[in-house]
Amino acid sequence: MTHPSGHTPQGGLGRLVVATALFALMAPVASAAAPLAALLLVSRPRTTREVVLAGVAAGLSVWWLLQPGDLPDQLLKATVVLTTTFFVAVTLRTRASFIHRALLALGGATAGVSLLLTILGSSWGELRWWVEHRSGLVVRELSARLGAMSDTGGDTGGGISMATTEQLEAFFGTFVRLTANYYPAVMTLVLLAGLAIATAIYGRVARNQTSPSLGRFRLFRFSEHLGWVAVLSLVAVLIPKLAAVKLTAANILVVVGTLYALRGAAVAASGIALAGGMNFFLWALFSVIFFMMLPVFVGGAILLGVIDTGVDFRRRWTAPRVGK
């Protein structure tokens, strides 16, 4: 089933450009280019813009896939291919919202990667070792440079003190462990963001769309059944007897917690829009306060997202009021 091109959303181009640029700086471009190329190709591109964009996206994806790399890199490439395949397949067969199609695709890709690791005689533990080893090399090189700076400082005060160097090394060590432990969760969120960007660009470019558009952020929601995933994961993290699956459950919690934070932010955005919005000065002030109190805002967003699954604030705010 196709969507008329007139239903393609035309607002928010500036936000889409900024989000795409930031994504390209922090993540492999192919994680968004591959699903974009696949979506355009299955839609049978007809216009020059569609053909050129599909060709560029496919070319970038193939070039990235052919690059050499160690286990984390190759596994990420396999995950991108599987996620793209599952996402397009689900898109062609269902009318589900973006987030449900994306979660189904990521779940299928995770199962596929687990099977691939088994076939290759590897494991998630080996992947964790590779990530820690690779990050550790970078940290050790940086620590050596900091140590050299502290040695050359002498009594002139021009270098970095030994105490500061030790604190930085301890911080870097913690960072390496966290990177290794939560690599699957980070990659899942990267792939989810890539699918979102690909869907948003596809919605603006494709004439014959085969899937629903991404939709407005302030309408973002997902099935309440995802809460059971969070509950079971939290139980696995807290019960000592389930230590074997604790790290897996913790990664799932990171992903689900991020989704609830996004839902809470969407509720807040909807409330701000209903209240009349904010001007540039208020947005700038809010941005400064947000980064100064990031943990508080993230925790509040998660809490608001969890409450919204039961209360559904946006439905209550927009529902017509019954007369007295």
Image (tube, rainbow, N blue to C red):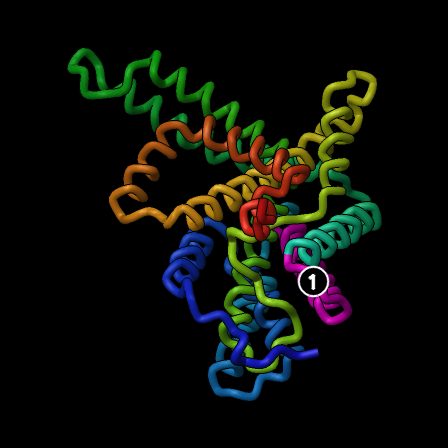
Residue 280, percent from left and from top? 27, 48
Question: Would you say 269 lies left or right of 34 here?
Answer: left
Question: Would you say 149 lies left or right of 156 here?
Answer: right
Which residue is at 40% across, 21% downward?
168
Q: Which residue is mark 1?
A: 87
Residue 107, percent from left and from top? 75, 50
Which residue is at 65% across, 70% downward?
211
Quadrant assignment for the N terminus: bottom right
- For disc 1, the neighbor class at 10 Å (few under 14, some 14 to 19, many from 20) is many
Magenta stretch in the rendered image: 73-98
Majority secondary structure of the magenta segment? helix
| Quadrant assignment, res 167 | top left
Residue 64, percent from left and from top? 55, 62
Residue nearest the observer in this picture, 36 or 156: 36
Question: Would you say 125 lies left or right of 151 here?
Answer: right
Query: Secondary structure beneath disc 1?
Result: helix
